[in-house]
Amino acid sequence: MQEQKPVVQPKQIAENHPALLPPGSQAQLPVALEVISETAIEPIAKPEPSGATDERIGFKGFFRLLRILLSFLFFVERLFINRRDWRFRKIVPDSDTLHVEGAALKEKLLRLGPTFIKIGQTLATRADLLPVEYIQELSQLQDKVPPFPTVEARQILEGELAAPLDTIFKEFPDEPVAAASLGQVYRAVLQTGQTVAVKIQRPQIHQQIDFDLLVLRRLTRRLERYPNLIRGLDWTGTLNEFRTTVYEEMDYRQELRNAEIFRKNFAEWREVYVPRLFPVFSTNRVIVMEFIDGWKVTDIDELKAAGFHAPEVVKLLAKTYLKQLLEDGFFHADPHPGNLRVMKDGRLAFFDFGMVGRVSMELQSKLINAFFHIVEKDVAGLVDDMIRLGFIELKGDEEERFKPIIQALFDRYLSLKLKEVNFKELTFDLAHVIYEFPFRIPASFTYIVRAIMTLEGIGTFVDPDFNFFEVARPYAKGFMFKREGRYLLGQLVKGESGTIEWGKVWKLAKMALKYYWRGENRL
């Protein structure tokens, strides 16, 4: 029998830990606390991941699977027709056709429900799998999700807080300010007068996602039998990564913990802000936090009118991600404009910490090595990094054939700004690499790629000359040089044999000299 969990008394929490409420409100605890203290708020148990291999999906599951397959069968039929002329010869679809296809895929995912909306959001980061036109259409899934009725949202909120809304909130609107795949957000006012954001989870979302994952696991086991269907895609690994992340994202208590970790990591950064949380009013399905007024990082005209330079905001955003990835090993995995605000005092606010990623020390070391080799255009070193990171497996003479291709990509694209890249040519070049060599994006990189691609998209929208690598270069070097000497000596200077590689010592010394000579350490 499962052990009974202790009951949480909101009034007791608020009285014993007044810091949970914003300054000035401790003496204004509303009657709501008296009301909800009469009834305990019991934490909802985190659902166990379903999808074990011995579970059956039943008739309902087969009907769901049939609907999924038919949806994509008609889509694939459309793709086939668009790639044949009237003589049935293969043709390459133009950009407009690809946009129409991407929009059709987006609509199918919306109709299939929250699980597939989340999958679509993940696919929007996979430029190795989909054309850029598809990526642009699927990116709209971030902020164009239909809301669920406010009547249901109120019922969920009252059930979670075990009290009538008017005892807790002075104002609660009829319409949400934002709707996402797992929940939606309202701007409300507490009885104490604080304006707050109230995030409420969609009804029956756990059951929906549990069931869909069970069906998808059955499907992926079949797809694993056809490794050449989409080369380089780890079906099971990607589904497992998605499952782990979506379960964590559905646990709003975990989101509170994630926000506190992020706040602690940026405690010394005055330019970064995390909204104050209200744990006393938050449960596994509800989060109440300080509402942040301000502008999206993509509101270029509004930022300019307020005296802010949007490209500088994007540079700050890029700098925070270098810290998150290379120093903290903990990063916000969903930095789309709706989850960021430029506050009136110029600080950059982060919120919605449901989707986070973690980078182990070992992976951080490999990423820094890869950055070192990219800066120095060391193709041999970068190929070794790609093998160690799991992007590619090479046998025998394949490495010698692979190096010139990477060198050509280096020479052709590394120094270009995004607006100068011909995506059709880049797609063909990458397709050649993927087809000829066993190239793949490891499941552990899914959310790193997602975050970086989202940042690149924000950057180029704000500033057409934006180049994430160029912006990141000085900060990445700074993090590299700030690492403890033992790490630098062990990982960057010494080779696998344990002997000092004087060539790397010389390169590192030159990099350090340029770094300080150019004043990049002051950026």
Image (spheres, rainbow, N blue to C red):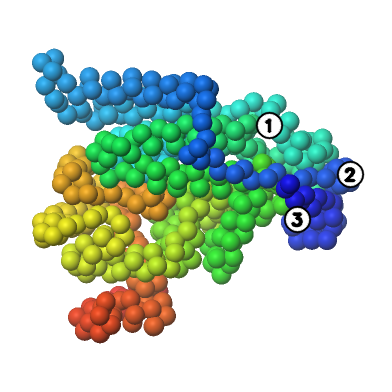
Quarter where residue 403 is shown: bottom left
Q: Which residue is mark 2?
A: 38
Between disc 1 and disc 2, whose residue precedes? Answer: 2
Q: How many marks?
A: 3
Q: Which residue is mark 3?
A: 21
Residue 233, x across and y down, in percent: 31, 43
Residue 144, x across and y down, in percent: 49, 31
Between disc 1 and disc 3, whose residue precedes? Answer: 3
- Asked if residue 167 can be seen in this view, the reply is yes
Q: Which residue is mark 1?
A: 153
Q: Is residue 116 above or below residue 499?
A: above
Quarter of the C terminus within the rendering: bottom left
Q: Is residue 112 above or below residue 452?
A: above
Q: Amino acid at mark 1?
A: Ala
Q: Nearest to the eye among marks 1 and 2: give it.
A: 2
Query: Does residue 271 appear left or right of residue 16 in this picture?
Result: left
Query: Does residue 423 appear left or right of residue 38 in this picture?
Result: left
